[in-house]
Amino acid sequence: MQTHLNALFVLSLAITGCASQTAPFNGGRWVDLTHAFSGETLYWPNAERFKLEMVFDGTTAKGYHYSANRYMAAEHGGTHMDAPIHFAGGGETVERIPLDHTIGPAVVVDVSESALSNPDYLIDVADLTRWELTHGRIPDHTIVLLRTGYDRYWPDARHYLGTAERGDAAIPHLHFPGLAPEAARWLADQRQIKAVGLDTASIDYGQSTHFESHQIFAKRHIPIFENLAGLEPLPATGATLVALPMKIAGGSGAPLRAVAWLPNR
Ligand SMILES: [Zn+2]
């Protein structure tokens, strides 16, 4: 009997040890990085906004409750992903993006001090190399998140986008920070990143006319996450990002549910 008990004890130790190694999301918390989709959700001035239409809400003739809606929106608005095909002919559409590019360790480069004082702020190579001086080289196979602090203005289009006007005529009036093309090239060529994301409406700043940072990442098969929210509590290193887009076949982009896991320190 003693032998049996010992064997059981060893077995239970083995199971416990095994469980602690295979339960990666213990000892920390999840943070939501997603703006909810609603009639207030911000879209590019010439893009279709989110619509939720009630199909049925109430008690059916058979006596049970039933609620269902239908929705419609442009791909590129709210918290969303840009697939490479958005700016590269022949690039991956949403459903073809490897899961490995949507889940993984994230680093957060906080430029909010500069970005919040200049709506045309361009995050440059110097911001990235300065981050590396403090935190070390951006590791390979990392997702780089850029924090401008602009999510604090959501859903106020005048402050978040620089204009509340709608239509093509509003596009020249867009003012919000983004990533300089040289910095995009540096991240794409000098570092091995899986994806990039930020808390403004576009990886290229509001005044961009040729969307070069989009083009650079798209050609390198790097997806982009835009209109992220709530990056503030994320540490510079150590968070894990899970950013899963709606799997739209043939999509150039898609609504995204982005969350991050923050381990206890
Ligand atoms: Zn987009």
Image (spheres, rainbow, N blue to C red):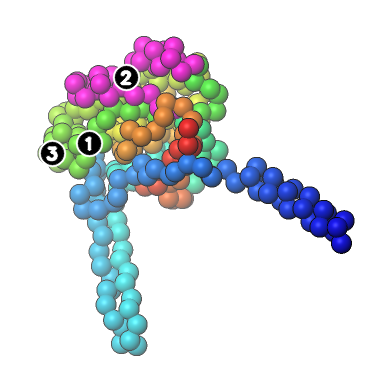
Q: Nearer the viewer, mark 1 or mark 2?
A: 1
Q: Which residue is mark 2?
A: 123
Residue 164's disc number: 3
Residue found farthest to the bottom: 62
Per the rendered image, the range of residues in magenta is: 107-136
Q: Is residue 250 visible?
A: no
The answer to which of marks 1 and 3 sits earlier in the sequence is: 1
| Viewer-proximal residue among 222 and 24 | 24
Q: Is residue 248 left or right of residue 37?
A: right
- Asked whether the beta carbons under mark 1 and mark 3 sit within 8 Å of each other, the answer is no
Residue type at the position of mark 1 = Arg
Q: Is residue 120 magenta?
A: yes
Label 3: few (<14), some (14–19) or many (≥20) C-alpha neighbours in 10 Å:
some
- Mark 2 neighbour density, 10 Å: few (under 14) some (14–19) many (20 or more): many
Q: Position of residue 148 (x, y in %)?
A: 29, 27
Q: Quick one: SS at disc 3?
A: loop
User: Tag 2 or tag 1, which sits nearer the N-term?
Assistant: 2
Q: Secondary structure at mark 2?
A: strand
The relative height of residue 66 versus residue 168 in the rendered view (above or below) is below
Q: Is residue 192 magenta?
A: no
Number of residues whose C-alpha sits closer than 10 Å to that of mark 1, classed few (under 14), some (14–19) or many (20 or more): some
Indicate which label's residue lies in the foreground, 1 or 3: 1
- Residue 68, compared with residue 202, is above or below; it is below
Q: Secondary structure at mark 1?
A: helix
From this view, report whether residue 190 is shown above or below residue 60.
above
Q: Which mark is residue 186?
A: none
